[in-house]
Amino acid sequence: MTELVSTAPDLMVMSHLFTAATENASEAMSRWTNGQITLSLEEVREVDLDQVSSELDVSDELLTMVVHHLDGELGGQLILTFDEQNGRHLAASLLKREICTDPEWSDLEKSALNETGNILSCAYMKVLTDMIGENLVPSPPYFIQDYGASILEQAVLAQAMVSDRVLVCRTNFRREGELLKWNVFFVPTDELLKKLTSTLESTD
């Protein structure tokens, strides 16, 4: 795993938390994909809001996404994104069939990706739930196709109301060691971020 880069001591502490959440999600993903897919947290740091898309290398290309919401004050969003090729490859692998070339995604393909997002988000949130002692339950996943930069801007809107900087966790996905063009974005509300920070400080 690449060494985590943080700009302050509290970010280093936060890095350990999100590393644990990512490792739990990676184990769940590996089981779900028969050992093919793993993920690792590469970096946690704060960036200016207007730099989020460029920092995460999210352009205006059309992406396939599975989105989860966390409702309430301790809320947020978790978004799993794929380019067309990687999304189709994963769906075909899970369904044990040839890669579909039809422009329209079938219900079975959508269901396979939604379940992937569900497994990842539940594993991710379990670590955070255990840490803060609050039950963080992601909503049922939903499948959308939209432009990556637009979705990311909407996701960080809540943080933009209270700060001109946003916490960024950079995550890599690999299939049997090969880096994939997947991303997972976890954007907590300001209230959840404060809860995580205060919990970590009290246990430090």
Image (cartoon, rainbow, N blue to C red):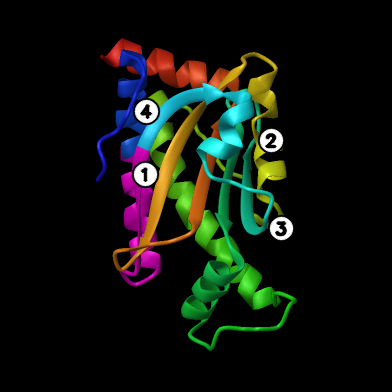
Q: CA distance from mark 2 to mark 3?
A: 16 Å
Work out whether mark 3 precedes mark 1 in sequence or the reverse, and give the earlier one.
1
Q: Which residue is depicted at the point 31% across and 46% down?
A: 23
Q: Which mark is residue 41?
A: none
Query: In the image, 27: left or right of 63?
Result: left
Residue range in magenta is 20-42
Queried whether the magenta region covers residue 34, the answer comes back as: yes
Q: Which mark is residue 144?
A: 3
Helix or strand or loop: what does disc 2 sit on? helix
Q: Quadrant of the C terminus?
A: top left
Work out whether mark 2 precedes mark 3 in sequence or the reverse, and give the earlier one.
3
Residue in the foreground of this view, choosing between 141 and 85? 85
- The residue that label 4 is drawn on is 131
Query: In the image, 132: left or right of 160?
Result: left
Question: Looking at the image, can residue 133 be seen?
Answer: no
| Amino acid type of the residue tagged 4 in the rendering | Met
Query: In the image, 51: left or right of 27?
Result: right
